[in-house]
Amino acid sequence: MANRIRTYLLLGLLTVIFVVIGSFFGKEGMYIAFFLALVMNWLSYFFSDRIVLAMYRAREVSPEEAPSLYRIVGELTQKASLPMPKIYIIPSATPNAFATGRNPSHSAVAVTSGIMELLNENELKGVLAHELSHIKNSDILIATVAATIAGAITMLARMLQWAALLGGGDDRRQGNIFTLVAMLVFAVLAPIAAMIVQMAISRGREYLADEGGAKLSGNPLYLANALRKLAMGVQARPLNNANPSTAHMFIVAPFSGRSILNLFSTHPPIEERIKRLEGMAF
């Protein structure tokens, strides 16, 4: 419940940032930026699953090709009262997994060949339960809403930056140099703040999926043990050619610890996630 409230508060904070930066332009500027961001993210919401699956060369498999995978997912979806998602395997030695799709009726779960080799059945069950929890919690919808507002903030910030630079001459003569500086500073800081809030929302949803996955699988240690193995597996065989815009989808960050992208991770620390899961077991 606390994580859900935190998510809604963070979405509210994104909205506040959007309204404040939009106040420099009036309603027209706000509506234009929000409309453009809404269109882009609407397209992403409806077609991102196909795009990301194609990006990682994921192949849909049948029950005959992956019987154990289908059996585990089937048991979990029945327990969670979810429709059966499509199941894909990504040909990669990196151990990882993600869920995608705009709603439970249009969803998919993708696992790498590496995770199938690394984890035992209980650990794989914990991972799949985590991914199904993302689907059940409508995390893709929440991520799209956050991305829409953050995208609108970024567009308004760019407009504000150009407005300050192009209108600078007149404002200086009127003695408004401090207003210009404030506009430029806010134009730079607002997108950074929006990105940080968006990452905080993503991290909060990971904790929720961990909690939901632990309950769905029946044993929090299944997922805790899986995360421990996955952290070491990604370090050994990172997916550093992964698109950073899709990093938040994976159960663990796909980049190695040496990557600067980890400074802006959309995932909570693995150690903290394991600690929380182990706390649920006792």
Image (cartoon, rainbow, N blue to C red):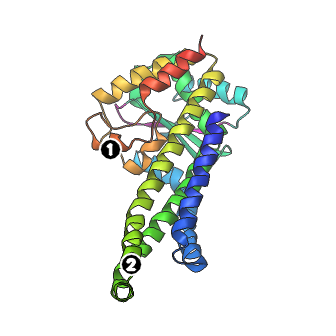
Q: Position of residue 118 (x, y in %)?
A: 40, 21
87 up-or-down from 271: above or below:
below
Please identify the quarter of the rendering in which residue 281 is found.
top right
Q: Position of residue 152 (x, y in %)?
A: 51, 65
Residue under pointer 1: 261
Q: Quadrant of the N terminus?
A: top right
What is the three-letter code of the residue carrying label 1? Leu
Q: How many numbered discs sit on the rendered protein? A: 2
In the image, farthest residue toward the left? 258
Q: Position of residue 86 (x, y in %)?
A: 59, 40
What is the three-letter code of the residue carrying label 2? Ala
232 up-or-down from 43: above or below:
above
Residue 236 in view in this figure: yes
Please identify the quarter of the rendering in which residue 87 is found.
top right
Q: Position of residue 157 (x, y in %)?
A: 44, 68
Give the mark nearer the N terminus: 1 vs 2: 2
80 up-or-down from 266: above or below:
above
Q: Quadrant of the C terminus?
A: top right
- Left or right, 197 with respect to 3, comes to left
Local secondary structure at mark 2:
helix
In the image, farthest residue toward the front? 175
Residue under pointer 2: 164
- Left or right, 5 with respect to 159, comes to right
183 up-or-down from 259: above or below:
below
How crowded pointer 2 is (Cα within 10 Å; few <14, some 14-19, many 20+) is rated as many
What residue is shown at x 40% (from left), y 45% (from top)? 56
- Left or right, 254 with respect to 125, comes to left
**What's the magenta region?**
84-94
